[in-house]
Amino acid sequence: MMADHAKILRLLKTARGQLDGIVKMVEEDRYCIDISTQVMATEALLKRANKEILSAHLEHCVKDAANEAEREQKIEEFVDTLGRILK
């Protein structure tokens, strides 16, 4: 992976910390809207991390593909991934 590892790890570790907090909120039977707000914040962090990863895929994996066939394969993988995201 050619993405900025430090940035990706920071986002993922922050999301993990938020998720641990959400579990605690559920265990403590906290207010539903507060829990939902934290879930959405965690989703936003994961989306940012995924955007960074996919951007790196385009910038490095696709751009640096050895030949046209490999490039087309990597673009197809990217499009398939977007399709799963947009479901």
Image (cartoon, rainbow, N blue to C red):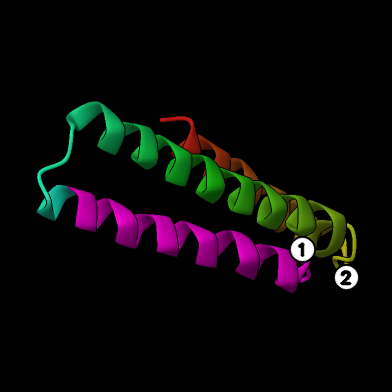
| Distance between the alpha carbons at the discs numbered 2 and 1 | 6 Å
Q: Position of residue 82 (x, y in %)?
A: 56, 39
Give me the residue at 63% from left, 66% from top. 10
Amino acid type, callout 1: Glu
For the residue pair 49 and 72, the one nearer the viewer reads as 49
For the residue pair 21 and 48, the one nearer the viewer reads as 21
Q: Main secondary structure of the magenta part?
A: helix
Does the residue at mark 2 contact the one at mark 1 (Cβ under 8 Å)? yes
Q: Which residues are magenta?
A: 1-25
Q: Is residue 12 left or right of residue 48?
A: left
Marker disc for residue 86: none
Q: Report crowding for label 2: few under 14, some 14 to 19, many 20 or more residues within 10 A (C-alpha).
A: few
Q: Is residue 14 magenta?
A: yes
For the residue pair 79 and 16, the one nearer the viewer reads as 16
Residue 53, placed above or below residue 31:
below
Residue 51, placed above or below residue 1:
above
Residue 19, placed above or below residue 78:
below
